[in-house]
Image (cartoon, rainbow, N blue to C red):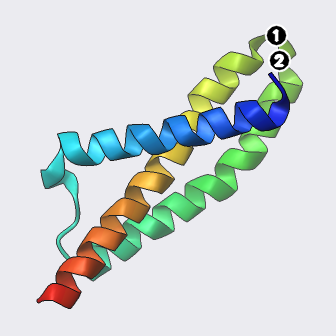
Amino acid sequence: MTAGQLLMAFTLGTAALAIWSYLRWPGAAPATIKGAMIRIAVALLLLQVGAPALGYGVEAAPAFAVAVVLGIAVPVLTYAFLASIWFLKVFADQIRG
C-alpha cells in the first residue's frame, strides 16, 4: 500500500465515521448557524494544531507512528467532517425555512 492509498483510506474512513456519528446522534447537531460556525471554527483550529502534532509525534516515536496517527489524525479528521455535515444541515434547514 502506498502512502497515497493509505491517506485515501484514512480520509474515507474518517468520513464514514462522521456520517455514522451524525446518524447515530442526531440531537448533537447545532440548531443555529452560530452554533455550526463555532463548531467549524473549532474543527479548523484542531486541524491547524493536529497537523504539527502529528508530525512531531511520528518524528519523536517512529515505532508508535500508527498509534499517533490513530490518536491524532482520525479524531481530528472525523470531527472536521462531522462539523461540515452539521454546517450543511443547519444551512439547508435555514434555506427551507
Task: Say the numbered circle drawn on residue 61.
Answer: 2
Q: Secondary structure at mark 2?
A: loop
- Image location of residue 46, percent across then percent down: 57, 53
Q: Give the Cα separation between the discs numbered 2 and 1.
A: 5 Å
Q: Is residue 71 left or right of residue 69?
A: left
**Res 71 quadrant in image:** top right
**Res 56 quadrant in image:** top right
Q: How many marks?
A: 2
Q: Secondary structure at mark 1?
A: helix
Residue at image coords 67%, 52%: 49
Residue at image coords 70%, 18%: 66
Looking at the image, which is closer to me, 88 or 45?
Answer: 88
Looking at the image, which is closer to me, 21 or 32?
Answer: 21
Q: Is residue 36 above or below residue 74?
A: below
Q: Is residue 90 left or right of residue 18?
A: left
Is residue 57 visible from the viewing direction of this image? yes
Residue at image coords 29%, 41%: 21
Task: Say the numbered circle drawn on residue 63.
Answer: 1
Task: Bin the neighbour count of mark 1 within 10 Å (Cα to Cα): few under 14, some 14-19, many 20 and up.
Answer: few
Residue at image coords 35%, 70%: 87
Q: Is residue 82 above or below residue 62?
A: below
Q: Is residue 93 left or right of residue 40?
A: left
The amino acid type of the residue labelled 1 equals Ala
The amino acid type of the residue labelled 2 equals Ala
Quadrant, the C terminus: bottom left
Q: Are marks 2 and 1 in contact (CB under 8 Å)?
A: yes
Quadrant, the N terminus: top right
Is residue 75 visible from the viewing direction of this image? no
Q: Is residue 30 above or below residue 63?
A: below
- Image location of residue 84, percent across then percent down: 42, 63
- Image location of residue 32, percent across then percent down: 21, 77
